[in-house]
Image (cartoon, grey):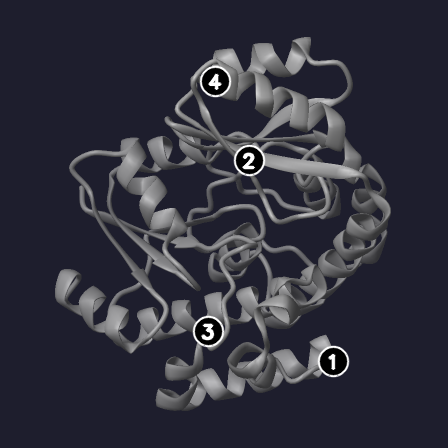
Amino acid sequence: MNKTAFLFSGQGSQYPGMGKELYQEFSYVRELYGAASEVFGFDVAAVSFEGSEQELSRTAVSQPVIYTLSLAACEVMMQEVCRPSCGAGHSLGEYAAMTACGILSREDGFRVIKARAAAMEKASQESDGAMYAVIGSDNSTIEEVCRETEGYVVPVNYNSPVQTVIAGEAKAAEAAAARLAEQGARTMKLAVSCAFHSKLMSGAAEEFREAVKDVTFHNPTIPFYSNLDGKLCSHIDADYLAQHLTSPVQFVEELRNMAADGCSRFIEVGPGKVLTGLVRKTLTNVTFQNVENMKTLRKAAELFPKA
């Protein structure tokens, strides 16, 4: 089988100028940005195109602008090139995937992201957490080091066979990263002030659950793969969204399950190409391409021509 998976970018993929070319080229993208601005309460296009790296890095800003560009790139791909056979996202990207797969309406998606960003921004200001990427160590070793480290630190992003992210209390995360480095791994502290996808997000998760309890969730019209276990998921509700904030991202399992189910074409829609790199490190005999501007859109059209 030759199925096509759309993958949606996560937080950290933002950059100044993101989305400008698609906005200038397509009227329906401009309409989407206008609708997003009404819900988010700021000019999403202006901030995306003219905002500084520092401004864009704020959780309350980065999540809305990434989500909006992800939806825009998805819409451009579907109208100009091809439609997805299934969808998945990484952390924040899972919400764009839910929208693309019909679980959330576009308007409810904006509302959900606004509530999520507010809850996580608050948690970032109140928390003493940290996150480290660990490259070149196996999961069993990382998990063992985390268990043996004093304080709270756990693996939270299983990104590829050679990259896992750990998170927890700042001192514990630093100690675990140092021990893993001593054992030969390469570690890098991430530019965040909170331990996302860990129990340190519990307060934010409860606040988020309350904010989205009245949102309408639909059955997916396109198969949707979940961060929680990497498997196909057909039931999403407010409890799921709250759990998502405190649970590890099983992205390796998602990619492997999509490939096992017949996906051989992977298109990352949204800013950056981090997920494209994870596909390259995880799967073999597949085709992949990111789409975020006119150049990458043209490449996608060459790789995945319309039938």
In whole angstroms, how far apart are the C-alphas of marks 4 and 3? 34 Å
Q: Is residue 28 left or right of residue 305?
A: right
Q: Is residue 33 left or right of residue 2?
A: right
Q: Is residue 111 left or right of residue 2?
A: right
Q: Nearer the viewer, residue 166 or 10?
A: 166
Residue 70, placed above or below residue 284:
below
* Residue 279 locus on image (x, y percent): 31, 41
Q: Of callouts 3 and 2, which one flags the residue occurring earlier in the amino acid sequence? A: 3
Circle 1 sits on which residue? 41
- Neighbour class for label 3 at 10 Å: few (<14), some, many (≥20)? many
Helix, strand or loop status at disc 4: helix
Q: Is residue 286 visible?
A: yes
* Residue 258 locus on image (x, y percent): 34, 38
Tell me the amino acid under the disc marked 4.
Answer: Asn
Tell me the amino acid under the disc marked 1.
Answer: Gly
Residue 190, placed above or below residue 157:
below
In whole angstroms, how far apart are the C-alphas of marks 3 and 2? 25 Å
Q: Quadrant of the N terminus?
A: top left
Q: Quadrant of residue 249?
A: top right
Tell me the amino acid under the disc marked 2.
Answer: Val
Tell me the amino acid under the disc marked 3.
Answer: Met
Q: Name which residue lies at 39% across and 24% down.
A: 136
